[in-house]
Image: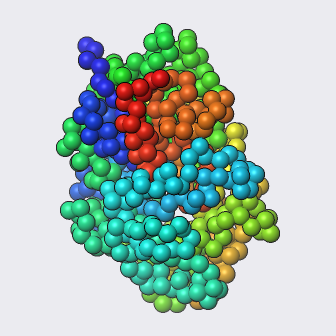
Amino acid sequence: MTEQPVDVLIIGAGASGAAVAWSLAETRMRIVCLEQGGMPNPSDFPATGRDWEARRSGDFSISPNVRKLPADYPVNDDDSPIKVANFNGVGGSTVLYAAHFPRFHPSDFKVRTLDGVADDWPLDYDALEPFFAENDRMMGVSGLAGDPAYPSGKAPVMPPLPLGKAGETLARGFNALGWHWWPSDIAINSKTYDGRDKCINLGACISGCAQGAKGSTDITYWPQAIRNGVELRTNCRVREITVNDQGMATGVIYYDRENREHALNAHVVVLAGNGIGTPRLLLNSKSNLFPDGLANSSGLVGKNLMFHPYAAIQGIFDQPLDGYRGPHKAIQSQEFYETDPDRGFLRGYTFETSRGMGPVGTAMTGLDRGRIPWGDGHHASFRKMFNRVTSLAAICEDLPEEHNRVTLDDHLTDSNGIPAPRISYTLSDNSKRMLEHAVARGTDVLKAAGALEVLTMSPIPFAGWHLLGTARMGKEPKRSVVNEWGRSHDVKNLFIVDGSIFVTAAGVNPTSTLQALALYIADQMKRRLANLFD
Ligand SMILES: Cc1cc2nc3c(=O)[nH]c(=O)nc-3n(C[C@H](O)[C@H](O)[C@H](O)COP(=O)(O)OP(=O)(O)OC[C@H]3O[C@@H](n4cnc5c(N)ncnc54)[C@H](O)[C@@H]3O)c2cc1C
């Protein structure tokens, strides 16, 4: 049976889908969001049990290919040195994210003008500024105003989280070298905020915050959007977006939890499936009018995939650092953020501090790196390492390249038989040089902070958690998939609001900018309600 058409149909209930649903709710239109996963139940999160670290290699792995839960779809990432990480369910990948919440810099929106690479964005920092601030309020961001790396006026809604022993140790390293550092903006409560208590340092942020101090959209935007009338349907996986003879989207075909097929018609379709899920769905939505996939007259759907190549620089110290207790990312340094051609690469990176590891993480790393032998000395070496490790992660700007892409796999499908995505990705020479620089300078910081020993890894293989660029925005239909306010150039009632519309990746985590952009697009839609399709 086909239902009455809804006004707005949103696909995906993650970071961007939640923000758009909440923002559009005030119009009182009939809004339905279809999400392939369920509503997370915090009492199921690993932090509630003693096996919390072990479950990171099982049902709470960051890799959909390891979890293999009914909500997940497989991703063929064999042809990529960086493997995909995500979460499929209400809240999307914010359920597992570390909640580091830096904004893009103004320079990130104009890299073609500044450095002659990639493209400028069709909008700038100032256009997003009110939406950054609105999103900070909704997600609950802790931090410290006055960071000289940003324009004035950025004021997080809560004081910064404590630096902890690990943060203080690394800050001493930066101070010794005279390099920039600042307490990180982070979407974790440093005090009671919006009915959620302050962080009690459970330390398992990236396997779900059982306490609710971390702002993931299942507990920030969604309760308010639902209260304001948005209907959220969980365990509903969209197979394809349907179109009429005029080339307008008419709605979707989706499967419910029992694998029953449904058609749902809509006046407006909003895609929020992330940088892999969105191009997958567009490429799966082929028709006579759109034989290469929907909204793909530019041929760019799936192309220009950007991760952030990460380097890890780990230090072993001779004193307890308490790093395994509490959130990651106490401080960050943007000493090497803006382009300096003398460094041998264009654009730059941020150092984020990662905290230490729990007992299982310490043991596994120690075994892998030959630092904890079996037999004699096993326990002594473990004790030498446990609670004595802290590290930096360098998050490097990845420039867009068309050959880095998402296509459909010829054989692999999900549990509904829908073709799965395939990733082809190589590290550019620019990224390799940037990673090398970051490893060398990160080693300097750890040594200056007093590390006895420094271990490095570059790139980190299982760090494909920022999924960007595969349906880029721009003013020219030949060179972009959506326009400067997220509307498809080809299909006038189709909008894309997730990380796939990013033009460039910057050298910071994307979610603050991604949600500000989603709120900006929702605002543009609301301003044009009378003539949305002209
Ligand atoms: C381990 C980890 C750590 C991270 N740490 C950080 C961090 O510290 N800071 C930061 O800024 N970012 C971080 N991220 C990234 C951050 O989570 C993402 O940038 C953000 O969630 C992306 O938002 P999105 O709306 O594009 O997609 P998502 O939040 O991934 O949401 C997409 C949703 O769409 C649904 N969907 C997809 N296809 C379909 C379909 N066909 N039918 C129905 N539903 C569908 C999915 O199930 C999913 O729920 C991290 C991510 C991970 C996995």
Asked if 482 appears above or below 519 in the picture, the reply is above
- In percent of width and height, residue 202 lies at 32, 70
Instruction: Report if residue 83 is visible in the image.
Output: no
- In percent of width and height, residue 118 lies at 70, 47
Instruction: Choose between 419 and 164: the one closer to the eye.
Output: 164
Q: Residue at x 41, y 71 (%)?
A: 143
**Left or right, 472 with reference to 58:** right
Q: Residue at x 36, y 55 (%)?
A: 134
Corner quadrant of residue 292: top right
**Left or right, 523 with reference to 247:** left
Quadrant of the snapshot with the N terminus? top left
- In percent of width and height, residue 412 lies at 53, 30
Q: Residue at x 25, y 17 (%)?
A: 4
Corner quadrant of residue 55: bottom left
What scheme was used to colour the molecule?
rainbow
- In percent of width and height, residue 264 lies at 32, 21
Asked if 139 appears above or below 379 in the picture, the reply is above
